[in-house]
Image (spheres, coloured by chain):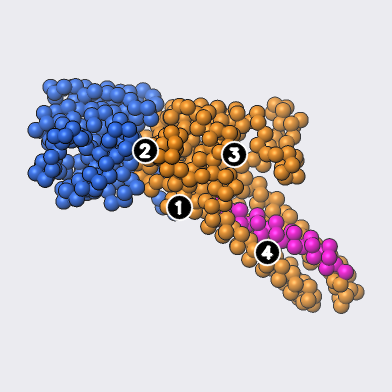
């Protein structure tokens, strides 16, 4: 925010940074090598659908685009905070195919002028013991953080910090811990 | 670069700029006027009188700077103390968790650092944000607001409005703007007391000079009163514009202007019915604001509308309607 924006009381919407998303397949490989966690093959994009027809049109375009790929069509759901989730499913071994799909969703939303409405993207992982882990990508920061939900709205902070050490070389990890916000009940996790 | 759907409102920005320019102009006018009066009187040989007047003016400016700075620097603590609000963490209660979750998402959407979150134990549905920078900012919702707005998206609209105040640095802007009013009010008070108590010993030496029949203190009193009146109206005007901007930014951030609109209707509907202040603590001036006879007549000029810190509900709803149309295009 510049000085003039402060004086005039306006905010520029935060544009998303989509490029870092392509670091995810590499991080998936690192996690497989260093830990027990494997991709579940599902990933989700979370965004805020705005009011009006313009957004519904784009939402439909996105769904059509993904359905064309011949994979399972993405599931659409809305959470209790009013955010829309598009969950894509892919072959668990094909991490880069999943990321390409997620990127397609993001870029069509951005092209439609709704880039500022993107909240986060999550790629889901699971270990042999059934613990789940999400790598959450924050569009506005261009950074990732691990999110390990446990039952009853608790998160496994120790595991999250351990994962941070693992993926630090592959991904830009969010340095400010107070921005690692929990996404309870995220679909696909 | 993808196109953007976030048009700013040039009219609102121009009006806000003009208001701030006028405030600056009044401030410059006050300084020039005071220097002119002092100069005029000292050239006529009333050095004793001008020295003491200069001392008051400097004192008023110093106290003004001091109190403005204190209210700026400790704005978060003062607001938390006076509202009786308590900082909460997500594990404290269901309400706290809900509030945190919404604030988390808004911060991620807007790319701003997360403010602290507080809940005030008041049944009046309301919310405020304060703090001199986004690092020490506090966003506070009353218990009444959390109960009244059971729809998460409505609550989110209100919080987005409050967080826009933080992003726009409204605490700093309004502190600087109201500095002028504080100084003018102090000047009036000092001039008034010195006229009341210091009047007896005044002007013995130059008593015969009838060109100076009007004592300098009276002139300072009048100048201070005029400045105060003008700056008061301008500050209130500026505050109403800042509210409209916060509505606008908040609605664009959530993408749901109509949710903010319905929250506004719910909250103000409730607030309008219940008086906010204890009758005994109400300032004497407040009685002056309420002019039901005037404001009830349609088409009448309403005193309420130029004195209030918030724009009328209809105006805010109209702006939100326009944003909703813009987003749908």
Q: Secondary structure at mark 1?
A: loop
Give the main secondary structure, helix, strand or loop, of the magenta stretch: helix
Going 61% across and 59% down the picture, which residue do you hit?
Answer: B67
Q: Are marks 3 and 4 on the same chain?
A: yes
Residue B72 image position (x, y, % from top left):
54, 56
The dot on residue B136 is 1
Q: Secondary structure at mark 4?
A: helix
Q: Is residue B308 shown left or right of residue B119?
A: right
Q: Bin the neighbour count of mark 1 within 10 Å (Cα to Cα): few under 14, some 14-19, many 20 and up.
A: some
- Can you see residue B20? no
Whole-number angstrom distance, CA of label 3 to CA of label 2: 27 Å
Residue B129 image position (x, y, % from top left):
51, 44
Going 70% across and 39% down the picture, which residue do you hit?
Answer: B278
The dot on residue B329 is none
Span shown in magenta:
B174-200
Going 55% across and 27% down the picture, which residue do you hit?
Answer: B266
Of labels 4 and 1, earlier in sequence is: 4
Whole-number angstrom distance, CA of label 4 to CA of label 1: 29 Å
Of labels 4 and 2, earlier in sequence is: 4
Q: Which residue is mark 4?
A: B60
Residue contact between numbered discs 4 and 1, judged by CB atoms under 8 Å:
no
Of labels 3 and 2, earlier in sequence is: 2
Mark 2 chain = B
Residue furthest right in the image: B208
The dot on residue B310 is 3
Of labels 1 and 2, earlier in sequence is: 2
| Figure quadrant of residue A147 | top left
Q: Which residue is mark 2?
A: B105
Q: Bin the neighbour count of mark 2 within 10 Å (Cα to Cα): few under 14, some 14-19, many 20 and up.
A: many
* Chain A display color: blue
Mark 3 chain = B
Q: Are marks 4 and 2 on the same chain?
A: yes
């Amino acid at each position: 925010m510049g000085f003039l924006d402060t004086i005039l009381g306006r905010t520029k919407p935060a544009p998303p940074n989509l490029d870092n998303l392509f670091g995810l397949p590499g991080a998936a490989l690192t996690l497989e090598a260093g830990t027990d966690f494997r991709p579940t093959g599902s990933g989700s994009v979370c965004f805020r659908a705005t009011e009006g027809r313009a957004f519904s049109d784009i939402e439909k375009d996105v769904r059509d685009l993904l359905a064309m790929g011949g994979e399972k069509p993405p599931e659409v759901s809305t959470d209790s905070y009013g955010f829309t989730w598009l969950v894509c499913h892919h072959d668990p071994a094909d991490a880069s195919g999943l990321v390409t799909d997620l990127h397609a969703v993001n870029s069509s939303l951005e092209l439609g002028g709704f880039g500022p409405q993107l909240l986060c993207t999550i790629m889901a992982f699971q270990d042999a013991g059934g613990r789940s882990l999400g790598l959450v990508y924050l569009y506005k920061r261009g950074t990732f953080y691990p999110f390990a939900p446990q039952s009853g709205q608790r998160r496994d902070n120790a595991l999250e910090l351990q994962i941070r050490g693992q993926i630090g070389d592959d991904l830009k990890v969010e340095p400010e811990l107070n921005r690692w916000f929990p996404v309870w009940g995220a679909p696909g996790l | 670069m993808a196109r953007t759907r976030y048009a700013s409102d040039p009219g609102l920005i121009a009006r806000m700029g003009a208001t701030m320019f006028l405030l600056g102009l009044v401030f410059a006018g006050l300084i020039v006027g005071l220097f002119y009066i002092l100069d005029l009187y000292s050239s006529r040989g009333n050095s004793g009188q001008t020295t003491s007047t200069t001392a008051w003016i400097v004192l008023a400016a110093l106290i003004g700077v001091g109190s403005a700075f204190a209210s700026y620097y400790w704005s978060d603590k003062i607001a938390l103390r006076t509202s009786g609000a308590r900082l909460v963490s997500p594990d404290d209660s269901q309400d706290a968790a809900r509030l945190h979750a919404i604030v988390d998402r808004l911060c991620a959407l807007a790319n701003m650092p997360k403010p602290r979150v507080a809940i005030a134990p008041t049944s009046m549905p309301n919310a405020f944000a304060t703090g001199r920078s986004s690092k020490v900012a506090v966003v506070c919702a009353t218990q009444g607001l959390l109960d009244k707005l059971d729809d998460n998206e409505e609550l989110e609209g209100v919080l987005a409005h409050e967080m826009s105040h933080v992003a726009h640095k409204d605490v700093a802007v309004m502190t600087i703007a109201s500095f002028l009013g504080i100084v003018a009010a102090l000047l009036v008070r000092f001039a008034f007391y010195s006229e009341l108590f210091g009047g007896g010993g005044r002007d013995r030496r130059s008593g015969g000079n009838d060109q100076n029949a009007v004592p300098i203190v009276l002139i300072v009193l009048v100048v201070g009163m005029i400045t105060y009146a003008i700056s008061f109206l301008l500050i209130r005007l500026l505050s109403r514009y800042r509210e409209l901007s916060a509505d606008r930014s908040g609605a664009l951030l959530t993408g749901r202007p109509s949710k903010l609109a319905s929250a506004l209707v719910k909250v103000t509907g409730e607030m309008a019915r219940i008086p906010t202040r204890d009758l005994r603590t109400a300032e004497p001036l407040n009685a002056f604001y309420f002019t039901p006879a005037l404001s009830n007549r349609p088409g009448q000029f309403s005193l309420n509308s130029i004195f209030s810190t918030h724009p009328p509900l209809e105006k805010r709803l109209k702006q939100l309607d326009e944003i909703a149309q813009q987003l749908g295009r």
